[in-house]
Amino acid sequence: MLTPPNEDTVYSIIKALGREIWSSSPTPAGLLVALSTDGTSVVAAALRSSGYTVTKVASNTVMVGGVDHLVLLEAQIAALQTERDRLMAARLETEAVR
């Protein structure tokens, strides 16, 4: 189940990357965002890492869909598993030295 995009959150992510928004329009498919300059790859990656679905529409335009909570949860689980593995390896290394 997707949750519609939150405009304020989308805008703050884009602005945190130092990008300016030329225009945006809510549509039935999501939030259509035109950036002031070309290049949407970094913006799309940042929005995806926040759980949003993103489709490149043009060189400076993306369609931001809803948040896929399952995908976001799976990413959080993967990050936790990686951290657990790192801690377990450190513990085993410490025990081997004793």
Image (cartoon, helix red, strand yellow):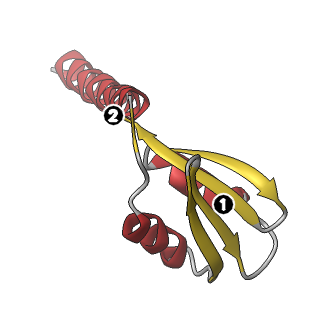
The number of discs equals 2
Quadrant for residue 2, please give it.
top left
Of residues 35 and 88, the one nearer the viewer is 35
At label 2, the amino acid type is: Gln
Q: What residue is disc 2 on?
A: 76
Quadrant for residue 3, please give it.
top left
At label 1, the amino acid type is: Val
The answer to which of marks 1 and 2 sits earlier in the sequence is 1
Q: What residue is disc 1 on?
A: 42
Of residues 14 and 3, the one nearer the viewer is 3
Identify the residue at horizontal 59%, vertical 68% (top origin).
25
Q: Position of residue 79 (x, y in %)?
A: 36, 33
Of residues 19 and 66, the one nearer the viewer is 66
Quadrant for residue 60, please give it.
bottom right
Q: Quadrant of the C terminus?
A: top left
Identify the residue at horizontal 22%, vertical 22% (top origin).
97
Q: Quadrant of the N terminus?
A: top left
Identify the residue at horizontal 39%, vertical 65% (top origin).
9
Neighbourhood count class around disc 2 (C-alpha, 10 Å): few under 14, some 14–19, many 20 upward: few
